[in-house]
Image (cartoon, grey):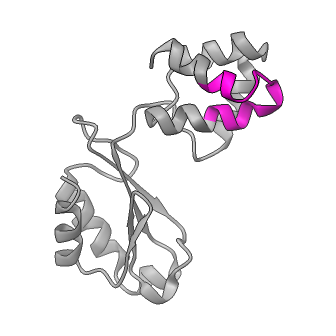
Amino acid sequence: MEIDKVDKIIDKHGGDASSLLQIMLDVQSENNWLPKQALDRIGEKLEVPMNRIQHIATFYKAFSLVPKGRHNVHVCVGTACHVRGATRILDSVEESTGIKSGETDLDLKFSVETVNCLGCCALGPVVEVNGKVHGKMTPVKTSEALKLYE
């Protein structure tokens, strides 16, 4: 990520250390992950110790310290989805993307993760792609839905 983009994000928040979390979220949103050079620049400009920034970056699940794909796929494996076949749906996602849960493909197209609940249990099993919920999934419907993001 270019340093001038990081500087613009910091400036947008007034260069205030109390905006650290929001600045990190904006950098994450812009880049899909938090590169070390961006974190270094944030620490330098806000005069915040790197150990505090690292603590925040590793504490919140929203942050990633490794590159993520353009399309974030979340497969619900909570109780309601699990009893309706979430394991088969996860298998279908892994087969369609060629990666396992917790991984990102080499083309940075997909990142796959399991989640404990997406809050729409009546639609289970559920797959969320880039924030769009796909409910009552079957392995075939899952493969077809993922083709929309290729």
Q: Main secondary structure of the magenta part?
A: helix
Q: Is residue 112 left or right of residue 4?
A: left
- In the rendered image, residue 31, in percent from the top left (x then y), is placed at 45, 32
The answer to whether residue 32 is magenta is: no
Q: Is residue 21 left or right of residue 139?
A: right
Camera-nearest residue between 66 and 17? 17
Residue at point 23%, 68% (across, down): 145
Q: Over which residues does the magenta segment extend?
A: 9-24
- In the rendered image, residue 119, in percent from the top left (x then y), is placed at 56, 76
Q: Is residue 63 left or right of residue 48?
A: left
From this viewpoint, is residue 49 visible? Answer: no
- In the rendered image, residue 132, in percent from the top left (x then y), is placed at 40, 66
Camera-nearest residue between 81 and 12? 12
- Residue at the limit of the structure toward the bottom, as seen here: 122
Camera-nearest residue between 6 and 38? 6
Q: Is residue 100 left or right of residue 28?
A: left
- In the rendered image, residue 95, in percent from the top left (x then y), is placed at 18, 59
Residue at point 38%, 86% (across, down): 84
The answer to which quarter of the image holds residue 81 is bottom left
The answer to whether residue 19 is magenta is: yes
From this viewpoint, is residue 7 visible? Answer: yes
* Residue 31 sits above or below residue 85 on the image: above
* Residue 28 sits above or below residue 38 on the image: below
Residue at point 30%, 80% (across, down): 137
Q: Quadrant of the N terminus?
A: top left
